[in-house]
Image (spheres, helix red, strand yellow):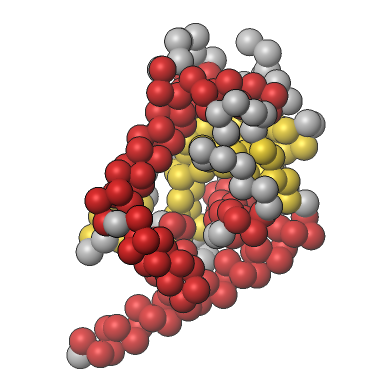
């Protein structure tokens, strides 16, 4: 195995869906909205408009086909990365091979794997999520998020809310595993693209602080909207 595996205790929380929103249930039975649910509910209007216009432009059927294919390839690639990082020696599914080959330049710089597909909770800010990977990349402890794409993103702006999502995961990992001395302030989005080396968008502590502040605003907006909805219902 080319890297060390030093896993933190793994928590696989139950995921439940309600009215299109995803929640994670902890060991006590308490339920918390997922990071993606909060981000989707507070998505900027220009992002909503862009998605709506894209679906109209390509047609609903084609949009569903593209989204479905992207979801399947992403799931297949994630599962193979997960098995690899846990030390399992298995062959790569054909659907994931182009993306797996793209990731090789990144995987060789990974060491000290601490968490793979683990559920985390932030009890102070009341949210939860499932983290792709906590490990050291080029010697720096961080949270990593794996993504697949048919063509390069080119810039962090085209990642949309992914950096904010990573800041949320960093905060939750730091609180959830604080008794183990975990304190992460670096993160990376790794985009696997067929026929080329994966793109790595790396975020240092200064950038992560900016995204963390944005995340806190999105949480506040989410609960404010929830409160308004309840008041309207009453």
| On screen, residue 98 above or below 171 | above
| On screen, residue 95 above or below 189 | above
- Count of marks, rendered view: 0
| Among the 4 quarters of the image, the one containing residue 22 | bottom left
Residue ID at (58%, 54%): 159
Residue ID at (71%, 58%): 208
Place of residue 68 in the rendered image (x, y in percent of width and height, measured from the top left): 32, 42
| Viewer-proximal residue among 179 and 67 | 67
**Which residue of the protein is positioned furthest toward the left in this rendering?**
234
| On screen, residue 155 above or below 105 | below
Left/right of residue 11 with respect to residue 168 in the rendered view: left
Place of residue 142 in the rendered image (x, y in percent of width and height, measured from the top left): 68, 41
| On screen, residue 95 above or below 149 | above
Residue ID at (53%, 19%): 84
Q: Quadrant of the C terminus?
A: bottom left
Place of residue 93 in the rendered image (x, y in percent of width and height, measured from the top left): 41, 17
Q: Is residue 162 visible?
A: yes
| Viewer-proximal residue among 67 and 226 | 67
Residue ID at (63%, 10%): 1
Q: Is residue 27 visible?
A: no
Place of residue 57 in the rendered image (x, y in percent of width and height, measured from the top left): 37, 61
Left/right of residue 141 with respect to residue 214 in the rendered view: right
């Amino acid at each position: 195995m080319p890297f060390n595996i030093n896993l933190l205790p793994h928590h696989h929380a139950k995921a439940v869906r309600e009215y299109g929103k995803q929640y994670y249930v902890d060991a006590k039975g308490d339920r918390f909205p997922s990071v993606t649910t909060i981000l989707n509910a507070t998505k900027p209007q220009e992002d909503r408009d862009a998605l709506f216009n894209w679906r109209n432009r390509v047609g609903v059927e084609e949009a569903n086909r593209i989204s479905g294919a992207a979801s399947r390839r992403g799931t297949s690639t994630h599962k193979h990365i997960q098995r690899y990082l846990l030390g399992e020696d298995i062959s790569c599914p054909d659907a994931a091979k182009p993306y797996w080959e793209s990731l090789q330049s990144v995987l060789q710089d990974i060491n000290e794997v601490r968490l793979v597909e683990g559920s985390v909770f932030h009890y102070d800010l009341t949210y939860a999520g499932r983290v792709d990977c906590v490990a050291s990349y080029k010697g720096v402890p961080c949270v990593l998020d794996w993504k697949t794409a048919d063509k390069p993103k080119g810039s962090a702006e085209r990642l949309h809310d992914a950096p904010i999502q990573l800041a949320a995961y960093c905060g939750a990992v730091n609180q959830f595993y604080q008794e183990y001395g975990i304190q992460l302030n670096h993160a990376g989005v790794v985009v696997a693209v067929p026929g080329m080396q994966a793109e790595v968008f790396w975020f240092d502590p200064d950038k992560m602080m900016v995204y963390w502040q944005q995340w806190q605003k999105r949480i506040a907006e989410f609960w404010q909207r929830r409160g308004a909805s309840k008041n309207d219902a009453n």
